[in-house]
Amino acid sequence: MLFQTPEFLVFLVIVVSFFAIARTGRWRKFVLVLASCIFYMWWSPSFIILLLVPMLVDFNVARWLAREESPARRRGLLAISIVANLGLLGFFKYYVFFLQNLLSLIHLAGANAQWRTPDIALPIGISFYTFERLSYTIDVYRRAAPPTRSALDFSLFITFFPRLIAGPIVRASDFLPQLHRRTALHFDLGIFFLLLSGLMKKVIVADNLSPFVEQVFSSPAVWPSVVIWLAAIAFAIQIYCDFSGYSEMAIGLGRIFGLELPKNFNRPYFSSSPSDFWRRWHISLSTWLRDYVYVSLGGNRGGTASTYRNLMLTMLIGGFWHGASWNFVLWGFLHGCALVFHRMVRSAERIATSPLRRRIGHVFSVALMQYWVLLCWIPFRIRDSSAMLTALRKFVVPDGNFEIASLGLGRMSIFSTSLLMLTFLTIHAFSNWKGDLDARFARASMPTIAAIGIAAGVIFVTMWPLSQAPFIYFQF
């Protein structure tokens, strides 16, 4: 059930209706939990077991952790939660990957082993809600947050449907306290703008760029460097609009029910360094990796070499979290290298003292960082190693061939794609000018709102794609 489909609109109207009819906060929470379970079962009813059974384990483990004083027993209880959650994630997401790589290693050793790898369906959203459950039990173990006594509240924290499938990754310490106040329906112009802008990012920008990206990256050998560059930029915009569009709609839907979800993006393509990029891109994941992986490994407390090791391991884990494929590990490795290199040379940034030099240095840093981000998106997008290396070579070493009219893309495809990307980059540049656009829209005059609504309607009618594509991060 995709956010942009008519069936989701019907689903939302029904949920809002029952939520409004419910008289007490407890019944309203029950409505949201039931609706969230139905939403999740829309893809595969049997997978609801993987959502609910570990939830019961973590709810009880957290309560036992709060009462237990013995360090050994507390570590044992935490291990139960970690093994239960990562065990399920490992089986469904990585078991086949490890079997296939083990078979490849056996063949490299000269043995002639053969076995059939099972076909295991990946439960949708499992990476997201696994991290949310882990953060809860780890926070209780660290005594950074108290456990909730309400099974209903904890169920709503785990299942809340707007962010269940693709985030943002929510912390219990941020979400559960909101359930202590009276829940009520909300709808204002700011919420409307979040839903509208998220839908436009996903459907109008991401889905319309998708065919161009697919055509080029499915066979990069036949395209010149200029087209590879255009495809890399197009994919960077596609994945941002796809994922941030989902996040904005999730935040807007949460606000309808009086629940605030964390901001997940902050103009990442204007970041000036690797660390700045990860403060802006997929913020809920990057902060999770920082707090529960990097800090647990020792952070920057063990000296320079240990810090570099911890940064690299954190990014490798972050890459592997995205999928059971070596291209995601490579993507994480490349970003890890950038973080380590930036930390090594960070002191050089203080050399420029004059305002002009600092401004020039900032522009250069932004351009260099975006070049690296674009390069990293290529192994993220292309899983075939041969095609990936071809695209990387053409991206890094231009071939000087600018003849694209006869290559089969067509001038209109190049023109429309470039125009769409230019429009996005313009909006992206001014999206945080004088505050968030949703807040500014909420204060806009009625003529301005009417003009934006009419323009959005025309854009949706003329540019709505023929087929509905699932959100990219659903696969993670």
Image (spheres, grey):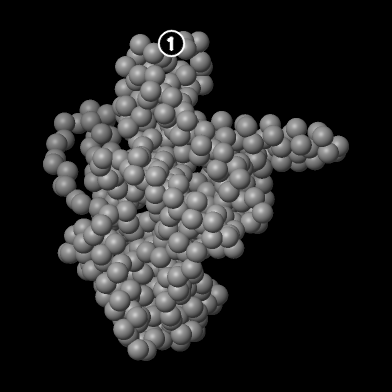
Residue that extends furthest to the bottom in the rendered view of this protein: 24
Which residue position holds label 1? Answer: 403
Quarter of the image for residue 210 reads: top left
Please tell me which residue is depicted at 37% across the width and 25% down the height of the picture: 413
Please tell me which residue is depicted at 16% across the width and 31% down the height of the picture: 112
Q: Amino acid at mark 1?
A: Glu
The answer to whether residue 56 is seen in the rendering is no
Quarter of the image for residue 346 reads: top right
Q: Is 233 or 100 nearer to us in this picture?
A: 233
- Left or right: residue 46 compared with residue 329: left
Q: Is 149 or 234 nearer to us in this picture?
A: 234
Image height check: is 321 above or below 396?
A: below
Residue that extends furthest to the right in the rendered view of this protein: 354
Quarter of the image for residue 447 reads: bottom right
Please tell me which residue is depicted at 35% across the width and 11% down the height of the picture: 406
x, y percentage for residue 187? Answer: 45, 70
Q: Is 61 or 173 nearer to us in this picture?
A: 173
Counting the numbered discs, the total is: 1
x, y percentage for residue 257? Answer: 41, 74
- Left or right: residue 231 compared with residue 44: right
Quadrant of the drawing holding the N terminus: bottom left
Q: Secondary structure at mark 1?
A: loop
Image height check: is 161 above or below 243?
A: below
Please tell me which residue is depicted at 21% across the width and 58% down the height of the picture: 43
x, y percentage for residue 455? Answer: 45, 47
x, y percentage for residue 74? Answer: 45, 77
